[in-house]
Image: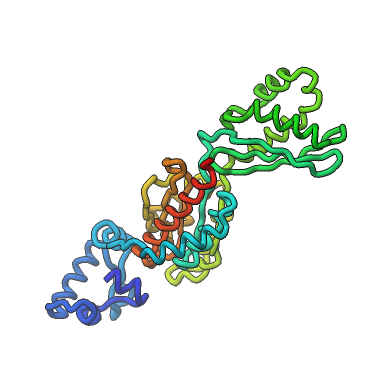
Amino acid sequence: MVDSYINTGEPVGSKSLIAQTGLDVSSATVRNDMADLTNRGYLVQPHTSAGRIPTHLGYRYYIDNSMTVTPVSEQGREYISNKLYESADSPESILNGATKLLSELTDCAAVATTPCSDNSRVHRINFVQIGSHTAMAVLIVSNGIIQTKLFRCSYIVTPEILSIFNQAMNEIFVGIRLSSINRPFLQTAAAKYGELSLLIPDVLIAIYDAAEKACQVSICKSGLTKLLFMSDTDFYSVKKLMEYLGNDHDLAAMLDKVPIDTAVFIGKENSRVELSESALISSRYMVDNNPSGVLAIIGSVRMNYSRSIAVLNCISECAGNLINELITI
């Protein structure tokens, strides 16, 4: 019944169910079973003369006990990998490509969070001259995240000065946890360099700002307007949902709590009331063999769960592999 309703969007009657499945029983037998499932909360009859449709409890039973997930084919996996490789310049660009592809293939809204920075360390710092008195610090983190920060100097910036900065700052910061880069650490670092400390306050502050930004989780989104076309949700609920998805802070906090393994949340199983009329499927991608950020789709409760899970798992694995390639030196 769930498969039929997902495919057609129409309430399922006893005769149509027999015709689709080839059950060797009478319509009366099927109607009795459907009535029993309705009494137990797995089905509901929207109209007296109509067939029945699954409830959220019915979907949950189906996902936990009846659904079969067939992995994406080798040809499909190759297509996904190649599409993601086109934007494999940084973790953010990979995840932007992943959410776009995920939305296209599932017809749902897709979101992703950047790699976790809890244990991330400074991998490298580079400097780029922008003007006669301005330069840019480029912070490269062990999880692949790259953050930049412009800074201005009272003296003229030359390639020789940037070379000195490059050597000195990498000696200080390479291997240091992002969480350890605070103002006392900067004061200790500045004191270490004697006369050079007069030239580097703006440089240290730029690195501090870049590190602080690198610690923050960023959200990638795609296909949010597809939520407007969910057939089983009213416009007010969709409006509240889209407003919630526009709040990156709350969305990141919610996604941070999802399990490591692929998980399906149906209706009120979601921790947010804004998601109570929709379904969310989440999966964590792996970075350096550890669970990292999250890829997730949000859509109608009447989505094709088996196909959506297969596509999500494939894209999550491919995205994690590409991010690992970026950070492996």
**Image position of 263 with respect to 29: above or below:** above
Answer with left or right where residue 312 lies relative to residue 14. right
Answer with left or right where residue 134 lies relative to residue 315. right
Residue 50 quadrant: bottom left
**Would residue 136 be visible to someone looking at this image?**
yes
58, 321: nearer the viewer: 321
**Image position of 141 with respect to 266: above or below:** above
Residue 97 x %, y %: 54, 59
All told, the count of numbered labels is: 0
Residue 48 x %, y %: 29, 77
**Would residue 244 be visible to someone looking at this image?**
no
318, 56: nearer the viewer: 318
Q: Residue at x 37, y 52 (%)?
A: 263
Which quadrant would the N terminus be assigned to in this image?
A: bottom left
26, 288: nearer the viewer: 288
Residue 307 quadrant: bottom left
**Image position of 65 with respect to 104: above or below:** above
Answer with left or right where residue 143 lies relative to residue 124. left
Answer with left or right where residue 115 lies relative to residue 8. right
Q: Residue at x 69, y 34 (%)?
A: 207
Q: Residue at x 73, y 18 (%)?
A: 191
Q: Residue at x 53, y 38 (%)?
A: 117
Residue 173 x %, y %: 63, 29
